[in-house]
Image (cartoon, helix red, strand yellow):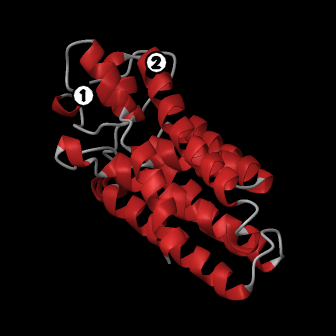
Amino acid sequence: MLTRIICVAIGYVFGLFQTSYIIGRMHGIDIRDHGSGNAGTTNMLRTMGTKAGLLTFFGDCLKCILAIVLVRFCFGKTHADMLALLEMYAAAGVILGHNFPFYLNFRGGKGIAATAGIVLALHPVITVCGIITFFTVFFLTHYVSLGSLLVYVGLVIEIIALGQSGAFGMAQPYLIEMYIVTLLLAAMAFWKHRENIKRLLAGTERKTYLFKKNKK
């Protein structure tokens, strides 16, 4: 249990690096007071432009990758039989730190760019599926929220499928624990996107474009 707590704590510390907030402050604003009020990639893209949005995405994604790599380095030999589970705990910590940073009164983002770190770092199959899912949905609909939520649905399915096929090399109790953590992260993502879901159902969700001006 202690090892799991350490991994979550490692992730939380990495998650506290609020890329959008830092970039916003460098330009004299608090991004949480603009646009949707969310400290994340999409709001940065709409509020400050493509460059700021992409920098935010890469920063938030990188912090999750670094947390996973650090856990892999620290526990790869001593806890090889449950390493993927510990990496997931670290990723969960990053998302918690990103979504609920204590020094910003727990007002952060929605954890999607940080989740991209899981997609890129955990397993090649998850990477390929995640990239295809998000960009297919995004370029067809221009709804970031829809693409993000479908990536999470895919992530749950892919982790369970890979786990049951033996890809993570863990015993069934560890796999079940990993599935539960993944499901909880997915549930949190859907909860954080509850207003987006309402707008998607109502047909009023705002579209986002990478290389042309986003409508206010």
Q: Above or below — where is 44 with respect to 183?
A: above
User: In the image, residue 9 lies at what x, y percent?
Assistant: 42, 57
Q: Residue at x 70, y 69 (%)?
A: 79
Q: Amino acid at mark 2?
A: Thr
The reply to whether residue 118 is in sight is yes
- Examine the image and state in which quarter residue 21 appears: top left
Residue occupying the point 42% across, 68% down: 187
> Residue 30, image x and y in percent?
20, 26
Rendered position, 11 above or below 5: above
Q: Nearer the N terminus, badge 2 or badge 1?
A: 1
Q: Nearer the viewer, residue 79 or 119?
A: 79
Q: Residues within 10 Å of mark 1 (few under 14, many from 20)?
A: many
**How many discs appear?**
2
Q: Determine whether 113 is above or below 202 in the image.
A: above
Q: CA distance from mark 2 to mark 1?
A: 15 Å
Q: Is residue 127 left or right of residue 113?
A: right
Left/right of residue 27 with respect to residue 164 in the rendered view: left
| Element type at mark 1 | helix
Quadrant where the C terminus is found in the figure: top left
Q: Horizontally, is 67 left or right of 45 in the view?
A: right
- Label 2: how many Cα within 10 Å (few below 14, some 14–19, many 20+): many
Residue that badge 2 annotates: 50
Q: Quadrant of residue 109?
A: top left
Q: Which residue is mark 1?
A: 31
